[in-house]
Image (tube, rainbow, N blue to C red):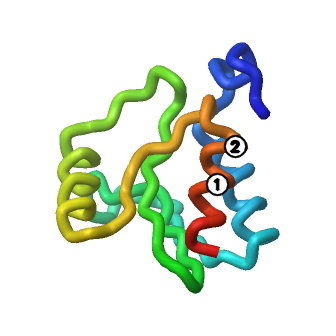
Amino acid sequence: MTTPALAGSMRERELQTGILSLARLMGLLVYHTYDSRRSQPGFPDLVIVGPRGVLYRELKTINGRVSPDQQKWLTALQRAGQDAGVWRPDQWPDVIQDEMRRVA
């Protein structure tokens, strides 16, 4: 488990790297747009697909703010019955791993 002090200093890229590694270990597929400048603004950072479901997750630092476009996508996905949300370093690894297990 990440301590609060470490979670506070963890960057979004470090969190993403951990999640991608865990997804590979769990046999999950992950999609991430590496250059979002030509993509729809606000679409979640990760789409994680397993045999029991799909997760749409925006990654943020502890103090990172969800933009209006990001919130629009998350809300639309949730209203469509999808599992969409935000993951932050203080949720690594326990909460994130538990959520990924639900779709594995």
**Amino acid at dot 2:** Asp
Q: Quadrant of residue 3?
A: top right
**Camera-side residue of 8 and 51:** 51
Q: Quadrant of residue 93?
A: top right
Residue 73 coordinates in the image, percent (x, y): 24, 56
Mark 1 touches mark 2? (CB < 8 Å): yes
Which residue lies at the image location 52% right of the left edge and 61% below the top edge? 34
Residue 74 coordinates in the image, percent (x, y): 28, 54
Query: Residue furthest toward the top?
Result: 5
Q: Quadrant of the N terminus?
A: top right
Q: Is residue 22 above or below residue 67?
A: below
**Camera-side residue of 95 and 37:** 95
Which residue lies at the image location 61% right of the left edge and 62% below the top edge? 100
Question: Residue under circle 2?
Answer: 94
Residue 22 coordinates in the image, percent (x, y): 75, 60
Residue 61 coordinates in the image, percent (x, y): 53, 30
Q: Secondary structure at mark 1?
A: helix
Query: Residue furthest toward the bottom?
Result: 51
Q: Seen in the image, is 7 located left or right of residue 56?
A: right
Residue density around tag 2, few if under 14, some if 14–19, many if 20 or more, within 10 Å: few
Q: Quadrant of the C terminus?
A: bottom right
Question: Residue under circle 1?
Answer: 98
**Camera-side residue of 64 and 84:** 84
**Amino acid at dot 1:** Asp
Q: Seen in the image, is 91 located left or right of residue 36?
A: right
Q: Seen in the image, is 40 located left or right of residue 23?
A: left
Q: Is residue 22 above or below residue 92?
A: below
Which residue lies at the image location 51% right of the left edge and 43% below the top edge? 87
What is the C-alpha distance between the residues marked 1 and 2? 6 Å
Which residue lies at the image location 20% right of the left edge and 70% below the top edge? 80
Residue density around tag 1, few if under 14, some if 14–19, many if 20 or more, within 10 Å: few
Q: Seen in the image, is 14 located left or right of residue 77?
A: right
